[in-house]
Image (cartoon, rainbow, N blue to C red):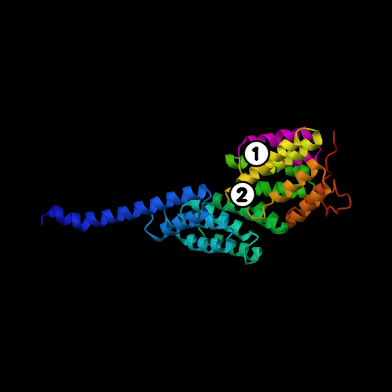
Amino acid sequence: MDLFSILFFVVGVPLTILTAVYAHATFLYARGDIAQQEGKLELAEKRFTKAARGLNPIGRGATLTALARVQLRMNRPDDAIQTLRRAAPKTKNPGIVLALYQLLIDAALHPEVSTPAADLLHDVERLLESTRMPATLRAMLLGQFAHAWARLENTDEARRLVETALAKDGLNPGALFTKGWLSLRDGDLDVARESFDKLSVVREKDQRPLGLYGLGTAAFYAGNLEEADRLYARALAEGSPLLEPFAAARAALVHQVLGKDAAGMLRRAEEAAEKLRSRKSLATHSSVDWLLAIARAWVHQDAAKAREALDAAPVTERAEAAALASALLPKVDTQGWKLSLPARP
């Protein structure tokens, strides 16, 4: 046997096998991603699971993170958390690290998770402390933790993390949105507008619609309805699918007061929400549910639908839901909501 043949068997054959294994893993990952986008979550889970078992040029951490995203969309937060904990030590790419922690936060807040959300968030924060990452990335995650604590009604912890995140990065999107929304709930429209205004011009294009959405809501409660209508239209024009049902539902409220086509805007909100649900991109108990219900109540002037909206609102949004429902249910306790509903022009 000549030297070339020896080299082929010693180097070429193993390299060919390894290349084939890598190619198969890449193929499974790509097919899993396609299945996920098509809403075929069981098939996506199967393909990502197979891709994570072999030698994977994409990275086992990235593949496990993709698998966890599918499990979370299937409303299996406990499985997603277990998968993400396996992924954490295998993940080095900053973008994947960010996605991993975002999914951990989402899973901790999922209504079907078996462990108390606060305990899970503390566990994830401890994991974050032991993870090496760029300072800007850490600040971004702190802002998202702040938003999570705000959703759990722990406003003291939320405000502490907001200030920590903004001290590291004054244009931190998650921190700005959380600060703006907490200020809105406290009735401090000036601080809310300042935070949302900064968010509307941040470098992350996909975060800017949130700033416009917040500014529109601040304008609504300030009684500047034409301005609110304009800002919600701008937020919708940005083309954010996840934000569309929220912004359209609030725009329907504005249209109802202004005497515009509120029913048409409500249909847009409902269709956008249904599209997200068909792709399993909305949680089982999404915050958009109460917002759509209150928009229906306003558009149809239906007190029963207002009660339905109030019952659907999570604890963190119940005060605003009560304030909006009070327009049709006069005896409802607005639970300390400090902003007034706009008067009809």
The kind of residue on which mark 1 rests is Ser
Left or right of 54 on screen, residue 137? right
Q: Quadrant of residue 342?
A: top right
Instruction: Tell me which segment is drawn in magenta.
Output: 211-239
Location of residue 258 with respect to 305 vertically, above or below: above
In the rendered view, would you say 234 is above or below 145?
above
Name the residue located 43 percent from the left edge and 49 percent from the top edge: 30
Confirm whether residue 210 shows in the render.
no
Q: Which of these two is toward me, 152 or 294?
A: 294
Q: Is residue 124 above or below residue 339?
A: below
Disc number for residue 183: none
> In this rendering, would 262 be left or right of 82?
right
Left or right: 286 as drawn, with respect to 8: right
The residue indicated by pointer 1 is 200
| Mark with earlier residue (2, 1) | 1
The Cα atoms of the two marked residues, 2 and 1, are separated by 27 Å
Q: Nearer the viewer, mark 2 or mark 1?
A: 2
Image quarter of the C terminus: top right
Report if residue 127 lies within the magenta region: no
Q: Amino acid at mark 2?
A: Arg
User: Foreground: 316 or 325?
Assistant: 325
Q: Position of residue 262 (x, y in %)?
A: 75, 36
Position of residue 7 measured from the top left corner of the image (x, y, whole percent): 18, 55
Crowding at mark 2 (Cα within 10 Å: few <14, some 14-19, many 20+): some
Q: Secondary structure at mark 1?
A: loop
Residue 131 screen position, x and y as percent: 51, 59
Residue at the extreme right of the image, as rendered: 331
At x 76%, y 44%, the residue is 296
Residue for badge 2:
277
